Image: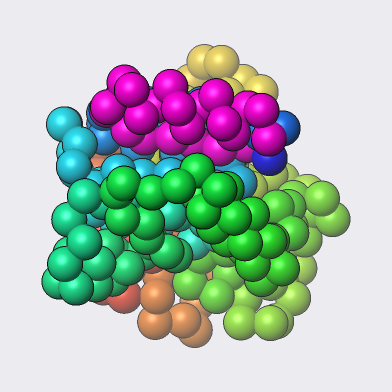
């Protein structure tokens, strides 16, 4: 089991790491919210243990940002602020459970195992990437939206997979050429624009939530947006 601990109290970190490691878990540690968010978004974890009071970004902010891109990973909030208002705020930000400080290690371990078991039981296979009703299966190399299978050529699929793996990032035409066509220079071709238009017709036409957007002078961005102001 892979655990990310985002906590800035060295003494508590030492106790938790020692206990969880002894229980057979693999623990990574981030000492502030900014580092914790970066690790959470760039690595796979089964559960994130997130203190509310953190420097950089507080735990509530970190939790909200994680949930924008990952609704599967279990998140357990640690808080010294055990008032009902603070607990509700933590849960409303996307946390699955909370544990008030001080706590007994046995309770922490039990909460972790319960949350991970619940998360895995209700999660989709990791090969599935979802956004706005679109599901891309990176194992079977297939896609569907709102349950309807989308017929894609090999190149269209590779372009779509590159987009969904880089959601909310502005991608230049050169980046797309390098990663989809394996071309590391601009040949003066409009092949990217042509295939983006092919893909738009298949995944965006007929849906209110548009996914492929043009960022003029820069390239494209793949994100959910009901108002498609940038597309051409």
Spot occupied by residue 120 in the image (x, y as percentages of width and height):
69, 61
149 lies left or right of 42: right
The N terminus is located in which quarter? top right
Using the rendered view, name the quadrant where residue 9 is placed: top left
- 148 vs 106: above or below: below
Find out whether residue 6 is within the magenta segment.
yes
Left of 38 or right of it: where is 18? right
For the point 50% across and 77% down, which residue is it? 205
- 167 sits left or right of 12 in the view: right
Please say whether residue 44 is one of the residues in the magenta stretch: no
Can residue 196 be seen here? The reply is no
Q: Is residue 11 above or below residue 107?
A: above
Q: Picture coordinates of residue 119 (x, y %)? A: 62, 63
The residue depicted at 37 percent of the width and 56 percent of the height is 99
Front in this rendered view, residue 1 or 209: 1
Residue, far right: 140
Q: Residue at x 45, y 54 (%)?
A: 75
Query: Which residue occupies 63% across, 27% down?
Result: 21
Q: Quadrant of residue 201?
A: bottom right
User: How is the protein colored in the picture?
Assistant: rainbow
Q: Position of residue 127 (x, y in %)?
A: 73, 52
Magenta stretch bounds: 2-23
Residue 157, position as x, y percentages in the image = 70, 52
């Amino acid at each position: 089991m892979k655990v990310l601990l985002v906590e800035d109290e060295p003494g508590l970190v030492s106790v938790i790491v020692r206990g969880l490691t002894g229980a057979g878990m693999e623990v990574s540690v981030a000492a502030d919210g900014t580092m914790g968010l970066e690790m959470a978004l760039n690595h796979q974890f089964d559960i994130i243990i997130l203190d509310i009071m953190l420097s950089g970004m507080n735990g509530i902010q970190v939790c909200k940002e994680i949930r924008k891109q990952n609704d599967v990973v279990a998140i357990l909030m640690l808080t010294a602020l055990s008032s009902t208002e603070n607990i509700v705020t933590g849960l409303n930000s996307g946390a699955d459970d909370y544990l008030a400080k001080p706590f007994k290690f046995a309770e922490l371990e039990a909460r972790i195992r319960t949350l991970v078991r619940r998360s895995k039981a209700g999660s989709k296979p990791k090969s599935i990437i979802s956004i706005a009703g679109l599901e891309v299966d990176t194992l079977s190399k297939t896609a569907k939206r709102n349950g309807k299978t989308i017929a894609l050529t090999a190149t269209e699929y590779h372009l779509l997979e590159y987009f969904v793996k880089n959601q909310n990032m502005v991608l230049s035409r050169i980046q797309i050429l390098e990663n989809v066509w394996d071309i590391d220079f601009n040949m003066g071709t409009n092949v990217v624009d042509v295939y983006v238009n092919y893909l738009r017709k298949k995944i965006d036409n007929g849906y209110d939530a548009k996914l492929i957007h043009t960022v003029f002078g820069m390239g494209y961005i793949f994100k959910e947006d009901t108002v498609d102001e940038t597309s051409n």
